[in-house]
Amino acid sequence: KVKLRILVEANGVTYEKSLEATHELLKPFINKLNVCYCLRQVHSLNHKLILTQSLIQSINQSINQSINQSNLLFVHALDVEGLFRISGSQADLLARKALFDKGDVQLSKDDSPHMITGLVKIFLRELQEPLCTAALYDTFLASAGSLDSIKRSIGQLPVHNRNLLQHLIHFLTFVSNNSHVNLMNHSNLGRIFGPNLFWKRQEEGAPKMDMNQLQATSERTNTITEKLIVNYDEMFDEPLASATSGRLTLQAKMLGHKKSVQWLALADQDRKVCSLDTLGLLKIWDSQTHKLITEFSVCEQGALIYSMITTSTDTIWTATSQSVCIWQLNGKLIGEAPGEAYSLCESPCGDVWVGGAQVMSIYSLRDIPKQAGTSPIKPIGTDLFNQNMFVLALVAVGKNRVWGCSSNKSLYVWDAKTKEMLKTIEIPEKRPKRITYVETEDSETVWVGGDEGVIQIINAKTYEVMNKIDNGGWDKIFVLTTIGSREVWSATWDIVVRVWDPKTRELTAEIKGYHADAISAILEVPNLKGGAECSNIWFGSYDKSISTYQLRSKDGSGESSKWSNANAKRSNVKPIRIGFTSRG
């Protein structure tokens, strides 16, 4: 809210008026005052409106600063233990409050989260009346036992009170959902915010409430606040504009990884999402509720992790500087193949291709045991390369191809059935590390990117370089992936996700999510419940967090585009002769 002080002088008498409202509401009022002032001058009335342009600019600047800094806690502080419970330095808190009262709302990520949350609580406590209003105090208390009644009470709030309440509860849901890290669940938050949202001034002459009444009232306000947090989606019908960026609406943010989250993959018929960080901690989440199911470590301390995939047999494969390991979804190790490995890919024929140091190894999923430790893991074929050549990324292309990009500025194309190398393509890219297959109605292309920030687009049938997207100032490319069959998404060092049209190769959108560092993994996850929300996007970040979004289609209908991988029926794996190699 903005406070506005107006002085008007008429016929020797000075009148003063103070207003408090949002900038959006005050702006038309100010314009009307200016119009009235001009008209009154025409009628020779000596009115003076003291409202300078510098004051308007100051109001605009303060509001813009507040909006830009509103995400500080969300981006930087959801993992802070005791958020909203622990008090910051009282001296710092009072000093910053004094600055806020003067209109200086500068905040930065270096400010103590406890100081910022302390300001929030002070703001709520020092309102002239509670956020949920004194008039509705008894109505809310009477509705404590029913969600429908609470929702009806919210509907009776003034629009600005309701909007602010929704913003606050929306943020508290993210705090509560990460209580395994910050130790602040919905019950703790209810006890903190109940007294700050619901209170009523004691009227003069009214009998004072005894201790039992106070305790009962406090418990009910805490319960209402707790229910607001737990049932946020039911209490508020419309999503917040601040939680929507273009076609993405924020759903959840998950914490708990100790290092950068660099790999995301679907498993168990899209019911689970696997996330892996650079420390080797693998977490398995429910793809629909975002709840953590289990977690385990996939490598020894000191090993470097280069890649992770999940296969059609619901096994997890990890490639590290020490070995390739195969895991069950419950965290049990099925088998291990020693040797450094950089890239992984399941071919259209039901094999797993592993790009290592100067060697390509191929494993048949038919030969992989389902139980842990029942037999050794051996490749069905290997192919040796030149010295100092490493396959850094692999992708399945079409019905019977596997493409790989290597450290020697080359692309390799193999036949997925015969395992024979079909083509070598030279590309002007020092370290091509990201590769994805894009299929549209009239074309098949392979997109390749790397450390130089350049995207090469190659015809998957003729092997010709069709287009080149130069570095636009974003430096390294960390992710190249298809979303449905209509878009290509890239994530770069500048913390921006870019959306490309695969036909025109033009940039159609730029997305900057709720992360403090670059996006390192992007995964499209189907909404198994169907309906309008058919597609969700998961972002993994170098800031050790995962955020999820509902994706709306370009026309705003909410319907997802056709799936390229997820929900596709897996073809039966044909038997392959043991020992068959790419050399025949």
Image (spheres, grey):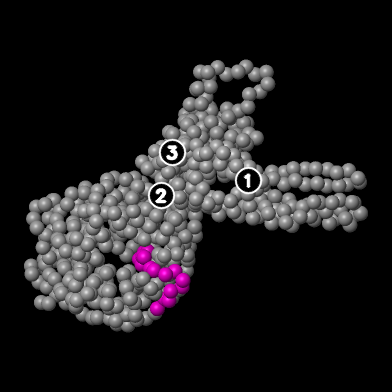
Secondary structure of the residue carrying numbered label 2: strand
- Residue drawn at (72%, 44%), measured in percent from left and top? 19
Q: Residues within 10 Å of mark 3 (few under 14, many from 20)?
A: some
Q: Position of residue 117 (x, y in %)?
A: 51, 41
Residue name at image x 51 percent, y 35 percent:
193
- On the picture, is 465 further left or further right than 552? left
Q: Quadrant of residue 42?
A: bottom right
C-alpha distance separating marks 1 and 2: 32 Å
Asked if the stretch drawn in magenta spans residue 475, the answer is yes
Single out the residue that lies furthest toward the front: 91
Q: Is residue 100 left or right of residue 217?
A: right
Q: Nearer the viewer, residue 278 or 503?
A: 278
Q: Can residue 253 be seen at all in this image of the molecule?
A: yes
Can residue 165 be seen in the rendering of this structure?
A: no
- Quadrant in which the C terminus appears: bottom left
**The residue under label 3 is which amino acid type?**
Gly
Name the residue tied to disc 3. Answer: 82
Location of residue 349 in the rendering, given as x and y in whole percent from the top left corner:
19, 67
Q: Identify residue for label 2.
A: 253
